[in-house]
Amino acid sequence: MLAIFKRELRSYFTTPIGYVFLAVFMAISGVVFALSTYMADTASLSTYFTMMTVAYVLLIPILTMKIFSDELRSKTDQLLLTAPVSITGVVFAKYLAALAMYMIAVALSMVNFLFMVFNGYTVQPGIAIGMFVGMILIGMACIAVGLFVSSLTESQLVAVLVTIVVLVVMMFINIFNQFIPFAWLRTALSWLAISSRYDTLAAGRFDFTAILYYVSIAGSFLLLTIRVFEKKRWH
């Protein structure tokens, strides 16, 4: 499992995808940060993190599009199925490599806060930490979604487009609640919405249910990915 993790993480830096992801992430992060803080002349970070959450719809698919699609295209997925590592180990290794790459990007984007402090803005540590934790949790969930979609197609383009569609639905599904007459369905849609749990964390308050939600979403899609390859192994 560790060998697969190292190979996957290394592949992000031996192919253009890793550099493209970091460049696009830093560019969007910098522009959004400048617009939401300096140009707005405010120390509030809520707009920045809200806009970055929406940006994940485009950023995460870049990171996850090749994870399994490339294996399927080159037919090396059969080697994974016969490797001396369990399917669960393979899936988690690839997931953790993508998550590590994402966390590198998030860590680099924290440079924005240093510029903010140096320019005399007051940043509330609790809110900043809560938003940072929220970014990590949302990333965990979105990467798991992208991983699952990548396991279904050998086309990286299809993986990108489908992941974008799925994330858009999951991000904004609660918007349609006002048009739904059934209370139970509105509750279900609110539960599925990725963005619905973020506000509490962004306010700097610890919310165990929000953490459990994002971990559950990530776990559910990882299990679905494992099932996809288990089915292939036995067919």
Image (cartoon, rainbow, N blue to C red):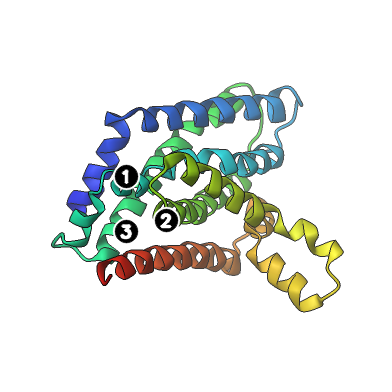
Alpha carbon of mark 2 to alpha carbon of mark 1: how far? 11 Å
Badge nearest the viewer, 3 or 2:
2
Q: Is residue 56 left or right of residue 15?
A: right
Task: Say whether disc 3 or disc 2 marks the residue closer to the N-terminus.
Answer: 3
Say which residue appears at 53% left-offset and 68% top-offset.
212
Residue 101 % position (x, y): 38, 41
Seen in the picture, residue 126 relative to 174 is either above or below; the reply is above
Query: Which residue bears the numbered disc 3?
Result: 91
Location of the C terminus (image quadrant): bottom left
Secondary structure of the residue carrying numbered label 3? helix
Dot 2 corresponds to which residue?
152
Kindly indicate whether the residue at mark 3 contacts the one at mark 1 (C-beta within 8 angstroms). no
Q: Position of residue 20 (x, y in %)?
A: 43, 28
Q: Which mark is residue 9?
A: none
Say what secondary structure mark 1 lies in.
Answer: helix
Q: Which residue is mark 1?
A: 73
**Which amino acid does the dot numbered 2 rest on?**
Leu
